[in-house]
């Protein structure tokens, strides 16, 4: 029985760290859109200009999206089938931990994908084992990156991908760019949607 207890903590830590590097993706789409008709794209400058992110990070995201669109066979065009837009959201979360051990994981976060500052959330141990010192509180900033695909003919949104995850607080530009590429790749891997074709 004692041996089992010693294995629980490493497994919890492994699960925690695995979740820190993952990207949670959710998508929505217009079921009436025929995605096989879309062959070309362009970036929606008006919307992208309004995104509250630094110009450098904006360029990194757009470059990653361009690589994904090219991989799927799309070509850039002056008269595109699809317009691509991006925007970000962020929110601060407060985590309160009160368990028998008296410690808690705060988790790392990124503010609007780190725009304007690659910030850490909270990571902390409550003082003392056995829960004698009360709850442990940590805060973290959770951000979301949205990628919108808009039908250029009717200007209607046909697909939206949202990714939520963490970015490393790093000054290493190569690691930052690699993480952005990973983030965009995870979102775009859900496109095109698996549509059910109705049989008449």
Image: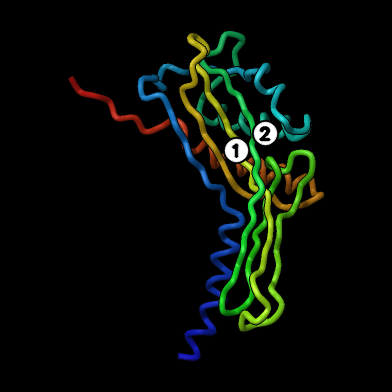
Which residue: 58% across, 44% down?
164
Position of 82 relative to 181 (above/below)? above
Which residue: 36% across, 20% down?
32
Kindly state the secondary structure of the residue where label 2 is placed: helix
Residue, far left: 200
Residue 196 image position (x, y, % from top left): 29, 30
Q: Are marks 2 and 1 in contact (CB under 8 Å)?
A: yes
Give the number of marks: 2
- For this view, does 73 lie left or right of residue 36? right
Which residue: 60% across, 24% down?
85
Query: Which residue position is annotated with label 1?
Result: 184
Residue 149 image position (x, y, % from top left): 53, 23
- For this view, does 59 lie left or right of residue 18? right
Query: Which residue position is annotated with label 2?
Result: 61
Residue, far right: 171
Position of 36 relative to 182 (above/below)? above
Which circle's residue, 2 or 1, is located before the other in the chain? 2
Kindly state the secondary structure of the residue where label 1 is placed: helix
Check the picture and name the quadrant holding the N terminus.
bottom left
Which residue: 78% across, 29% down?
55
- For this view, does 42 lie left or right of residue 190? right
Position of 140 relative to 192 (above/below)? below
The dot on residue 77 is: none
Residue 152 image position (x, y, % from top left): 52, 12
**C-alpha separation, residue under disc 2 versus residue under disc 1:** 7 Å
- For this view, does 150 lie left or right of residue 42? left
Residue, far bottom: 2
Check the picture and name the quadrant holding the C terminus.
top left
Position of 116 relative to 169 (above/below)? above
């Amino acid at each position: 029985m004692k041996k089992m207890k010693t294995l629980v903590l490493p497994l919890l830590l492994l699960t925690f760290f695995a979740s820190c590097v993952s990207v949670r993706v959710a998508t929505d789409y217009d079921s009436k859109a025929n995605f096989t008709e879309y062959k070309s794209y362009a970036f929606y400058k008006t919307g992208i200009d309004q995104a509250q992110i630094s110009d450098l990070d904006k360029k990194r995201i757009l470059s990653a999206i361009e690589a994904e669109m090219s991989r799927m066979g799309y070509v850039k065009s002056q008269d595109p089938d699809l317009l691509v837009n991006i925007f970000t959201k962020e929110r601060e979360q407060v985590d309160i931990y009160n368990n028998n051990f008296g410690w808690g994981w705060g988790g790392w976060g990124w503010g609007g994908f780190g725009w304007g500052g690659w910030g850490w959330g909270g990571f902390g141990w409550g003082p003392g084992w056995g829960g004698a010192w009360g709850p442990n509180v940590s805060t973290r900033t959770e951000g979301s990156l949205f990628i919108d695909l808009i039908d250029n003919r009717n200007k209607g949104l046909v697909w939206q991908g949202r990714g939520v995850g963490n970015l490393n607080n790093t000054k290493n530009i190569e690691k930052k760019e690699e993480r952005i590429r990973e983030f965009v790749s995870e979102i775009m891997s859900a496109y095109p949607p698996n549509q059910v074709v109705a049989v008449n």
